[in-house]
Each structure stands twice: as C-alpha cells, then as structure tokens.
Image: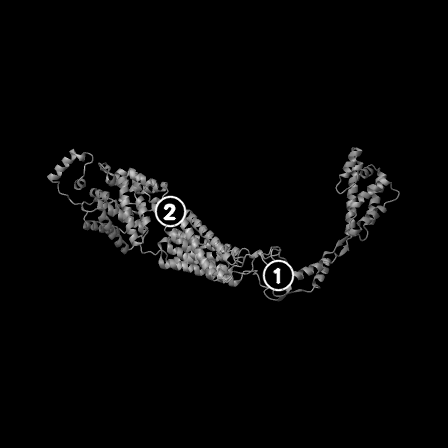
Amino acid sequence: MSSRRILTGRRALLFAAALASALVAALFPWFPGTDAVSEGSLATRTITAPRSATYESAVLTEALREEAAAAVSDVYVLDPGVRDTQLRSLDRQLAMIDAERRDQGLSASARESTIRAIDGVDLSPRAADALGSADDESWQQLASEARNALGRALTGAVSADDLPATRERAEGFLSAELDEVHRLGLGELLGPLVVPTLVVDRERTEFVREEARAAQRPVEVVVEAGDPVVTRDEPITAAQAEALQMLELVESDVRLESIVATVLVAMLAAAALAGYLFVEQPLSVAGFRRLLLLALLLLVPAIVAKFGIPLALPDEERRFLVHALPLAATPVAAAVLLDVPVAVLLAMLVAAIASFLALEVPGSDGVGAATPLEAVRVSLVVIAASLGGILPAARAERQQRYLLAGIGAALAGAAAAGATWMLDVERSGIDLLWIAVTTTVGGFLAAMIAVGAFVVLSRPFGIITRVELMELAQLNHPLLRRLQDEAPGTFQHSVLVGTLAERAADRIGANPLVARVGAYYHDVGKLVAPSFFVENQTGESPHGGLDPLQSTRVIQQHVTAGMDIARRAGLPEAIAQFIPQHHGTRLVAFFYRRAAEQNPSIDPDLFRYPGPRPRTRESALVMLADGCEAAVRASSDHSPDQIRAIVEGVFRERIDERQFDDCPISLRDLRVASDSFVTALVAVFPPRVEYPEPTERERAERLGGAEGEGRAGEPRDPAGQARR
C-alpha cells in the first residue's frame, strides 16, 4: 500500500510558481481595443471633458512651427561647376555626332537615325540630318558656335524660372551667318544642356527654417468642463488624441499598479489551487498530465476573458454581451474529466479572474472601465452558470444528458444576472430580454465546448469519461460479445468480478463504474487460447501434455495478448491498464509449485507475471476480486465461514506479496472491501440444501399425471428440478 502523496510540498510549490507565471503572462495588463483612441480612428462615442484644464499642446505647437518653416523659401547659391559639367556633356555629344558624320559607310537615313539615338541627344529628323550632312569646315564652325553659346548662356546665375529665357538667349548667341537649318540643329542640341546654375543651400535653408520654428510660441489650449473632446463616429485628430491624454481619459502606457495587481491576482489563484491539491490530495489529478490539464482548464478561460471582456465592457448600451462568453465551459469539463470538488474550485477562480479583469480593463474605445456592479455581475454569473452546468454533467451517462448541463448553466446564469439587475438603478424591462438571450447563448456554448473538451482531451490526458464508461459497460460491446461466444466461462467470471469490484469501490469511495468496466475487460487476453483456462474447459485439460514452464508461458500470454487486443479494440488506457495490473508481479503459483516439486532450485521469476503492480484502488480491487472469486468457486465448501476465510486469505496473501506498494489504498479500504466481498460471495454461492428422495405417493402421482393432463405440460417438482 503506497504512502506516497499525490502532490508533495515541493511539487505543489513548483506547480504554483509555474501556474502563477503563466497567469501573469495571460493576464498582463495590455488589452485589445485600447489602441483604438489614436489619430485617424473613429470615435465609438462622444466624450466630454470631465473637468476644466489648460495645457500646452505639443501637437498644435508642432503644426504651427512646421507651417512657419514651410513658409521659408529655399536659399540658392551659384554653383560654378554646373557650367563646366554641361560643357563637357556638350563636347561628348559633339564628338559622337562627329564620329557618325565621318562614317562614310552609312546612308543618309541610317546616319540620321544613329545620331538621334545618341544618349542625351534629342534632335528632330531634320536637325539630325543637317548636323550629320555638314562638311568638315561647316562642322568645325558649328561645334565652335555651340560651345560659345552654351558657355555664355551658363555664365552667371540661372534659376529654374529663368530656363526658358536662358535657352532663347543661348540660341541668340549663335552667329547670324548660320543658315536656318543649322541654327535649328544647334538650338535643339543646346536646349537640354541649359540647366539652372543656382542650387539649394541645404544647410543655410535649414538654419533659416529653424529660426522660423523657434520664433513660434507654444500653443495653449483651454478646455472647459463639459466641452466635447471627440464626437461619435468622427475620425479622431492628433489634437483630440492629445486632449484625451492630457485629460487622463485614456491610458497610453501600462501602469506599474496594474502590473502589481495582476501579479498578486495570479499568485493568489495559483496558490489557492496548489494549496487545495496539497491538502486534499485528490486522486483525479495524480500525475503530471493531470496537473497540466488542470492548469490549462484555468488558463484557457482566463485568456478568453482577457480578450473577450474588453469587447463587451463597459456595457453602455446595456446589451449584457459579456454573459455570452462561455467561461463556464472549463469548470463543466473539469467535473467530467477530473472531479466535482476540483471543478467547483475552478469555477470560483475563473469567476474571480473574470471579475478582476472586468474592473481592470478599459472599454472597447480605450476610455473608462466597467462599473463595480458589472464586475460583481460577471463574477456571480460565472459561478452560477458553472455550478448549474457542473451538477448535471458530473452524472451524465449519455451524450444527450449534456444538454441538461447547457440548460442548467443558462438558467443559473440568468438567475444570477437577474438578481444583480434588481439592484441596478438604471434597469429597464428590455434588460431582461437581453439577459435571457446572452445567458442562454453562454450556457449552451459552455456545454458544447465542454463536450468537445471531453472528446479531445480525454485520451491524450489518460482520462475516461462517464459516458464512455457506460458505453464500454454494455454487454453487447463487440469485445464482450467475443468473450461470451469464445470464452463463456471467462465472461461469467469477469461479470462476477465486476460486480464484486463495483460494490467494494462504492463502499471505499473509489470509482465504481471504472472498477466494473475494468473487470469486464481484465481477462480479454484469454480469447487467444480460452481452452487453457479452467473456467472454459469442458473436457480434458490441454495442460496435460505440457511441462509447467510451457503451461506458465501460455497463462502469462493472456496478459501480453490482452494488451494487444485492447489496443486493437481501441480501449482507453484507463481500462487497458487493468489487464497487466490485475495480476501484478505475482507468481503463476500452480505451475511454479509443480515445477518446484521436480526442481526445487528453479528460478521463481520464470513463473512471475510481468506487472506492473496495481497503481489505482480500482485495479487493486479487481486483483482481489479476481482472486477471491476464483478461490471461492474452486472450493467445495461454500459456507459463510469458509468464504470469509478464503477471502481473508487472498487479501493477506496479496498484502504479504507487497502487491499494493504502488497503490493508494489503505488498510481501512481493504477491510471494507473484504467485508463487501464476503457478503456478495455468500449471496452468489449459498450452501445447497440436500432434498430428501420423493415419496411413493409423489412417484405415483407423477406417473398418473403423465398419462392424463400432464401430457400437455408435466408439472415439475421443485426439489427434483433442483437435484437435476
């Protein structure tokens, strides 16, 4: 019998620390929707100033200064390098045109096209033809005229506004002796090369603009109490966002006080849960996977509340939408996956966290927060809806029964919301309709999510639900039908073991349904070779031709084969574990003793079951019920005293073999289970009363009846029937 605690002090502290850290991360005081009050966003309501205030507006001051700076024109300076750069560009273009002009292999049209394609040159066909067809003497004159005209045009200050006049002036510098077509060609060539020689002095310009900015005085804004700051459905300007900030109508940063409050709430919730587990040591959360599941069942609704409550509170339009959040889903799921006390504690913690968030979070427009009455209403509705769903769900035996959990959650939530509505000075009749709708939605959503949680989470976390147990307990289950057809003795034995284990489990506070279902399937491995087990033998035993070790291998095989059959049949782990644990690490005593008669030094471990030993009280009860039923059935004396002696011997033998060292079952549990087994087995195997032989008169009456009316249906003697 294991004395280990489900949760040691160290593990409880580690669990509390990890859960608190996760809750702090989940509840950190940043909320969706708080960034809605920003420049360009639409105001969801009209907000007025709660008090008078005067402040210097950084937004308006900066706008005024930028306007003054923008009014300052750019400062230009002469750049002598522009003239030289443009003359070099002209020389490059002239050289390329001259090269094409000298190429005698080109036709006139080809030369014209090639000259027009030169990079930077933008000539009309006529101008390109005139320049390309000039003779050497004319070309030299044209080139000289172009350089002289461009150089003179770019001498001095030329601004962007002066460009048209400067280009005309450049054409005017060309010699009057040039014919019209050559003047046209040089004019088109020089036009793009005439650019401004005045450039912006960036440093000087910025200096002048900074002086203009500095000359502007800060803008002072005066706000009177009651003045509208933002108007509903209108875009929020930068100045309005600043006004909200200055009037402390919206928080722009996470406050230290909020962080400290969040840490304290997370620590309290984690400490409460870990403290309960440490003190009560509930078997439903034994193991790391169950602790992880419990943590998830608290974290998930906390996250849902964190992101859902800011969208519903403050409830200025009185729609009570916060009650549609399915926060009761995880407490209802915990009632089925774990147990009811844990689920109730979880409901209280979820309600406390939701109430804290209702007070902490700002509204969906980033302004204001829920009223205390709204926070209390959220807490009461979550607790009521959770309890209303927990009670029906905890005892549900069919999927349809979870509909009652949804109804219970909806009704309880509506009642709690209605109670707070009665205290609300702003209440109106239409509120009741909204309360009915939202609590109904929340209740049924919670039930549906809880059902989904059962399906998704039960197998990964090694949990079997009551509904699944009820399905497995049906005697028409395919695996049990195989037992009835192929190993009827084993089937009858399993049913009786299930009855014994279920009755004892109910008496000691274990799970009676798990014990019964586990017993039904504990011997499914005997389907591999049913005739090798005495309860299925009708003739000569097949062990007669085997040595003890070979027979032991066949007997041991029903454990390993049973696990294979269970996996193929999809039995849950919580039920499949009964197959190896119901024999633990015991010896196959009958064949070991036969082998020891032949060889006293033979190793007993060769005849030992592979284990493990029972890990749960239910599997321990099945081990004991299995042994007691077999021993009593094998005994020829079924008197109450003999049955008690057999049962106590089986219990004492298992205890001496330390089969319960890994199992949280107490001596008191074993004593209660022993008494339960004795009572049940005495009822199943009552002592037989030996009836006396029939009298001569009875025989004569039977013979007479057989010739008369007895031919249609012979009456039977109860005593004779009993003897037969």
Name the element at disc 2: loop
- For label 2, the crowd category at 10 Å Cα-Cα, with few meaning under 14, some 14 to 19 and many 20 or more, is some
Q: How many badges with numbers are in the image? A: 2
Q: In which quarter of the image is the N terminus?
A: bottom left
Please state, as top left, top right, bottom left or bottom right, where the C terminus lies in the image.
top left
CB contact under 8 Å: marks 2 and 1: no
Decide if residue 16 is on the left or right side of residue 216. Answer: left
Spot occupied by residue 696 in the image (x, y as percentages of width and height)? 10, 39
Q: Which residue lies furthest to the front in this view?
A: 709
**Residue 295 sits above or below residue 720 on the image:** below
Residue located 29% across and 49% down the image: 502
Residue projecting furthest to the left: 696
Residue at label 1? 229
Residue 513 placed where, x, y %? Answer: 32, 49
User: Which element is circle 1 on?
Assistant: strand
Q: Residues within 10 Å of mark 1 (few under 14, many from 20)?
A: some
Q: Is residue 724 something one can see in this rendering?
A: no
Residue 332, percent from left and from top: 41, 52
Quadrant assignment, res 54: bottom right
In the picture, measured across the screen, residue 556 lies left or right of residue 157, that is left
Residue ID for mark 2: 398
Residue 243 appears in the figure: yes
